[in-house]
Image (cartoon, rainbow, N blue to C red):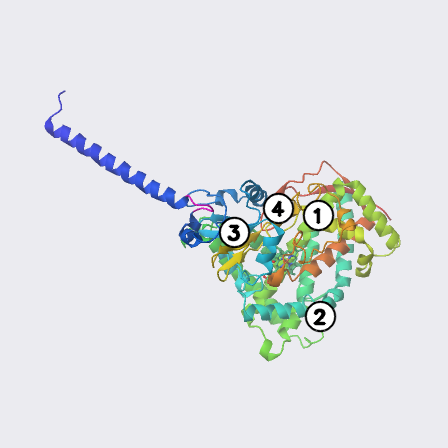
């Protein structure tokens, strides 16, 4: 059929339309590619001209719109470490996580500048953390008078050396309980899956430290409810939420916001009820628990009701999993490295009699045991990216490079503690390295700072370590840990760096 003039015109017209459409699309793509193709990705684009007279930050360009988000899975710490090495950006690397500008340090010097300088004293608040009230607690409260007050109160009444020593009998009681449960499980199943036992012990310790020893208000049903709430909170904070990376409030695909609201209502009701009950107690002064201390503060220092709930909830939330996760890693390394386990036990045997229980005062006489804990914190830090990032409150110079206000900063502690230019044989498990050289892990030596450093350093570090040391020593004193099957040391980064598969082993009791 011969085309008419009309059909020819129509087809030429539609071709022109298609051509115009394609050209526009190509132009838009070219513009967006140009916008995205900068070191660190497109979130750094609008700051490019500020670098005309400054050194530029190296970093991956990442994907359009998403930036480096696709790389931030369950092994983000290892991926970011190899990116920093390949881009020669260990000192400081720029990247984009959605629309968020981020810098990452994988070097002790720049890590110190970030953690200990005054520029990064805030934290970026995830939507879930905000909804779960953590912005009103120590961890996410913006730096300022309120945060300083909370930290001072917690330092005095929760983390002081006196409070930690008052809680020794609680730690011993929970250790004895753990030993009993472990043996029971061994007898019943022929193998021990220690994760549940450690979580239960950790939760009980935190509940009693926060709400009071042998306090009748924490009966087992409430303990279970609180344990489930902490578990759900962990899950929610670790769940990927588009809203944290893009400025759209309707991107709650996983229902995180809805679930956070539900959980917050529950927290307010359960913890609020405990607070109300305690208020009716006649004797608050003289009690050693954190809640009684908060309620006995002088009028001018008193913390409001809902903020009291937020800070109590935070203590339970932060203190429970970190300790349990670290101990599971330590026990895994003890099962795998029988020689190290034997050496640690010999030290304990020399220091502690057959029938005695380990005491806090024994720990300074157990340097090898302490070295074991340090070596596990080096190889498997519970917070490889220091868990909670920092936020630049104003323009800062790190390593003489300008980092604009509002930039998120992370320290890849895992990369630093696995760097062969810093540590000899970094992949080897060798606690002896900490006997040969004294390395403080409390935040003064950036080669290993698993609790962070500077003004926002972990306030629970001494309490956490006291618990880990005592429980580990008591465990090795009572049992020989042997493999049930080859131990899978794969990691999974959620809120903390966990063992991907729960650890299982067998125990041989040492004393009947
Ligand atoms: C093995 C145990 C623990 C590890 C590895 C650990 C690790 C950390 C890290 C890396 C930070 C961020 C520090 C920074 O930004 O410089 C932190 C902050 C914090 N930790 Fe811990 N932690 C542990 C135990 C605890 C315990 C037992 C508690 C409380 C009961 C606790 C409460 C907190 C709080 C409230 C913050 C926020 C501090 C602030 O922003 O001012 N932690 N922790």
Chief secondary structure of the magenta portion = loop
First in sequence, mark 2 or 3: give its number. Answer: 3
- Residue 106 is one of the magenta-drawn residues: no
Q: Are marks 2 and 1 in contact (CB under 8 Å)?
A: no
First in sequence, mark 4 or 3: give its number. Answer: 3
In front of the other: label 4 or label 1?
A: 4
Q: Residue furthest left?
A: 5
Quarter of the rendered image showing ligand 1: bottom right
First in sequence, mark 4 or 1: give its number. Answer: 1
Q: Are marks 4 and 1 in contact (CB under 8 Å)?
A: no
The residue pinned by badge 2 equals 288
The residue pinned by badge 4 equals 415
In front of the other: label 2 or label 3?
A: 3
Marks 2 and 4, Cα distance to the nearest angstrom?
40 Å
In front of the other: label 2 or label 1?
A: 1
Q: Which residues are magenta?
A: 37-41
First in sequence, mark 2 or 1: give its number. Answer: 2
Viewer can see residue 191: no
How far across and down, in percent of the image, does residue 319 sit? 65, 58
Q: Residues within 10 Å of mark 1 (few under 14, many from 20)?
A: many
Q: Residues within 10 Å of mark 4 (few under 14, many from 20)?
A: many
Q: Quadrant of the N terminus?
A: top left
Marks 4 and 3, Cα distance to the nearest angstrom?
14 Å
Mark carried by residue 103? 3
Q: Are marks 4 and 3 in contact (CB under 8 Å)?
A: no
In front of the other: label 2 or label 4?
A: 4
In front of the other: label 1 or label 3?
A: 3
């Amino acid at each position: 059929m011969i085309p008419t003039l009309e059909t020819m015109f129509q087809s030429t017209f539609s071709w022109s339309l298609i051509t115009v459409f394609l050209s526009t699309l190509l132009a838009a793509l070219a513009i967006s590619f140009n916008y995205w193709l900068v070191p660190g990705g497109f979130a750094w684009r609008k700051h490019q001209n500020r670098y005309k007279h400054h050194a530029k930050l190296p970093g991956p360009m990442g994907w359009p719109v998403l930036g480096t988000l696709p790389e931030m899975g369950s092994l983000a710490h290892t991926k970011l470490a190899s990116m920093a090495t390949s881009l020669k950006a260990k000192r400081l690397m720029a990247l984009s996580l959605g629309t968020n500008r981020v810098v990452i340090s994988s070097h002790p010097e720049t890590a110190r500048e970030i953690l200990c300088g005054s520029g990064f004293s805030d934290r970026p608040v995830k939507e879930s953390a905000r909804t779960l009230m953590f912005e009103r607690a120590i961890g996410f409260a913006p730096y300022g008078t309120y945060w300083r007050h909370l930290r001072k109160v917690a330092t005095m009444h929760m983390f002081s050396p006196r409070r930690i020593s008052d809680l020794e009998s609680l730690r011993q009681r929970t250790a004895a309980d753990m030993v009993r449960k472990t043996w029971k499980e061994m007898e019943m199943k022929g193998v021990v899956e220690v994760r549940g036992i450690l979580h239960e012990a950790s939760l009980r310790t935190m509940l009693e430290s926060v709400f009071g020893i042998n306090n009748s208000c924490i009966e087992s049903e409430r303990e279970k409810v609180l344990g489930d709430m902490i578990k759900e909170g962990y899950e929610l904070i670790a769940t990927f939420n588009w809203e944290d990376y893009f400025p759209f409030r309707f991107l709650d695909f996983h229902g995180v916001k809805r679930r956070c609201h539900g959980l917050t209502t529950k927290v307010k009701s359960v913890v609020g009820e405990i607070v109300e009950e305690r208020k009716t107690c006649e004797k608050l002064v003289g009690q050693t628990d954190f809640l009684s201390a908060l309620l006995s503060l002088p009028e001018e220092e008193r913390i409001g009701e809902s903020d009291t709930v937020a800070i109590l909830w935070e203590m339970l939330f932060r203190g429970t999993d970190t300790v349990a996760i670290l101990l599971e890693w330590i026990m895994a390394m003890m099962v795998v490295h029988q020689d190290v386990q034997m050496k640690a036990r010999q030290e304990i045997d020399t220091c502690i009699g057959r029938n005695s229980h380990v005491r806090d005062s024994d720990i300074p006489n157990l340097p090898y045991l302490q070295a074991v804990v340090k070596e596990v914190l080096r190889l498997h830090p519970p917070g490889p990216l220091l868990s909670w990032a920092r936020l630049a409150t104003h323009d800062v110079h790190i390593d003489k490079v300008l980092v604009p206000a509002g930039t998120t900063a992370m320290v890849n502690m895992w990369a630093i503690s696995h760097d062969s230019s810093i540590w000899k044989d970094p992949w080897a498990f060798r606690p002896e390295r900490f006997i040969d050289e004294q390395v403080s892990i409390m935040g003064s030596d950036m080669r290993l700072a698993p609790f962070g450093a500077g003004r926002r350093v972990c306030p629970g570090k001494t309490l956490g370590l006291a618990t880990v040391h005592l429980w580990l020593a008591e465990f090795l004193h009572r049992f020989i840990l042997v493999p049930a099957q080859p131990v899978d040391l794969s990691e999974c980064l959620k809120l903390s760096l966990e063992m991907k598969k729960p650890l299982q082993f067998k125990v041989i009791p040492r004393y009947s």
